[in-house]
Image (spheres, helix red, strand yellow):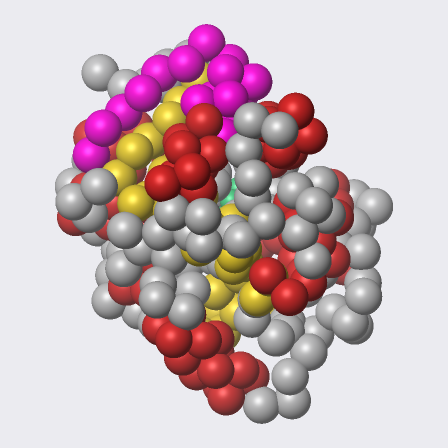
Amino acid sequence: MEVVIVPDARAGGELIAEAMASLVCRKPGALLGVATGSTPLPVYEALSAKVRSGAVDMSRARIYQLDEYVGLPAGHPESYRSTVLREVVEPLGLTEDSFFGPDGTAEDVQAACEAYDRALAEAGGVDLQLLGIGTDGHIGFNEPCSSLASRTRIKTLTEQTRVDNARFFDNDIEQVPHHVITQGIGTILEARHLVLLATGEAKADAVAHSVEGPVSAFVPASALQLHPHATVVVDEAAASKLK
Ligand code: F6R
């Protein structure tokens, strides 16, 4: 695992966008796995600026969503499908054809999880998976105590994660879904390159436990230590509890 400390979130976004752009230059049909939330926004902004300036042609790239709320109606602005379309797919000049994610509206959630894993395998797997980290150390929505070998499945969000995400739902925790479909930790570890971005002091404990603590299901992001090509990009605030 390599840890890169950058001055701020903008620099982290620029660095990761550069890695994504250079991957797409080498492999135009690369499959990029994307996370949602606040942290990755500087990455998507920097990458779409590169597309607009003509520095990279992303037209053949494919975008796969990491997780999805269960039970939000199709088209809900805070569903992760809507979010990734708005924040990633459209700014990169891509269409829905190049984008795939778990179906959080499916009646048979188990079948939707299996269909997602199958689609991922048939697409050749993820070339670069961008991850954020929860204040409790989750990646995707693999909350503490998730199996390190888990596959895509339904998970229950912890109260802490629902509180953290209430800001996307008018600060009303009642509106935050209880369940999500998320790639499992085992699924995430199959990506060829994992890039975790963490910014801000609120992530400092989770980063320290993930990077310097033991590999443990209590801290799902510590599983990155098992991966042969994992990069953790942290700003100075998120790095502040590293030894
Ligand atoms: C969302 C996801 C989550 C977030 C994490 C951090 O797709 O995978 O693991 O990355 O909850 O969220 P922010 O960046 O909003 O602090």
Residues 178 and 96: in front is 96
In-image side of 209 versus 136 (left or right): left
In the image, residue 90 lies in the stretch drawn in magenta = no
Residues 89 and 180: in front is 89
In-image side of 172 versus 228 (left or right): right
Q: Is residue 63 above or below residue 1?
A: below
Q: Is residue 131 above or below residue 162?
A: above
Identify the residue shown where x is 83% and y is 46%: 170
Q: Is residue 186 visible?
A: yes
Residues 61 and 119: in front is 61
The quarter of the rendered structure image containing the C terminus is: top left
Report the number of discs: 0
Identify the residue shown where x is 65% and y is 89%: 107
Instruction: Look at the image and give the residue range highlighted in magenta.
Output: 1-17
Residues 55 and 10: in front is 55
Q: Give coordinates of residue 231: x percent, y percent.
A: 30, 33
Q: Give coordinates of residue 195: x percent, y percent.
A: 37, 38
Q: Is residue 239 above or below residue 197?
A: above
